[in-house]
Amino acid sequence: MTPTGEQLAYTDAYARSVEATVRHVETGGSAIVVLDRTVFYPGGGGQPSDRGLLLRATDGRSWTVRGARKAGGEITHELEPDGDPPVVGDRLQVDLDWARRFALMRTHTALHALCGVVWRDHGAQVTGGNMEPGSGRMDFEFESMSGDLVDSIEEAVNVELGKERDVRVNVLPRAEAFAIPDLIRTKINLLPEGIEEIRTIEIVGLDLQADGGTHVANTREVGRIRVTGYESKGRINKRIRIELVDPIPDG
Ligand SMILES: [Zn+2]
């Protein structure tokens, strides 16, 4: 087994481009490409995978990456069907669709701020979530949720985002992570036995979660959010939908 390629999304969410060498190609309807390093996020934790481009400088040929996945520890890139794929050994420039990724980073951090406020003010645990660029939803065990509460939650989230809180990524040994009481509420205990290190995202002073996603570095980059809806998924389980208020910049 060769070691896996370098996976920059986990260590530097702002890396939008990198030079890489092709290590493996599976041809087919849509080719699958593995590189020795990549800036693509493979999806997970409710955050969809990145899209983007691979560019071969030697002849100017480029390929659209329509999605990425984690497979056997590697991040794989799935290409739009478009003639011959690159070959092993090719040097490529790897470019994210950055407008889309940055919108996902802002949305993901906004959802964590929502979790932090709902936990702090109402003691409700999150059970799941999902997002698109600019909008998302979170599900909570939140029996007492009501329209009035949702209005106050929106206001409280915007107050917290406006405090320009730093957002930090940490990687902790499993035992250390399990000793942090706040992490238990995000169901860290469901993580498989084999995982030795736990990656956490901390909105300093508001929220701490085990999380694999990409986030902005400060809540000021999120701007404001608005609650666009809420639903009852049963007596206990409730869903809150939000979107980013501030426009998504181009490029
Ligand atoms: Zn998350």
Image (cartoon, helix red, strand yellow):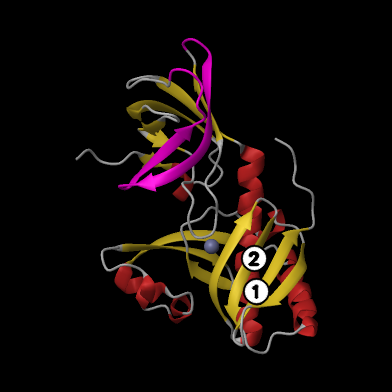
Q: Is residue 218 above or below residue 36?
A: below
Residue 250 spot, x, y in % from top left = 74, 38
Query: Which is nearer the eye, 155 or 48?
Result: 48
Say which amino acid is labelled 1: Arg
Say which amino acid is labelled 2: Arg
Q: Residue at x 31, y 67 (%)?
A: 192
Q: Is residue 212 above or below residue 180?
A: above
In the image, is residue 196 part of the stretch drawn in magenta?
A: no
Q: In terms of secondary structure, where does tag 1 sit?
A: strand
Q: Can residue 11 be spotted in the picture?
A: no
Q: Is residue 214 above or below residue 170?
A: above
Query: Which residue does the numbered mark 2 point to in the structure image?
Result: 137
Residue 94 spot, x, y in % from top left = 49, 30
On-image quarter of the N terminus = top left
Q: Residue at x 66, y 50 (%)?
A: 133
Disc number for residue 44: none
**First of labels 1, 2 by sequence position:** 2
Q: Which residues are magenta?
A: 58-84
Give the class, few, some or many, for how many residues have Cα within 10 Å of label 2's Cα (few <14, many ≥20).
Answer: many
Q: Residue at x 62, y 87 (%)?
A: 235
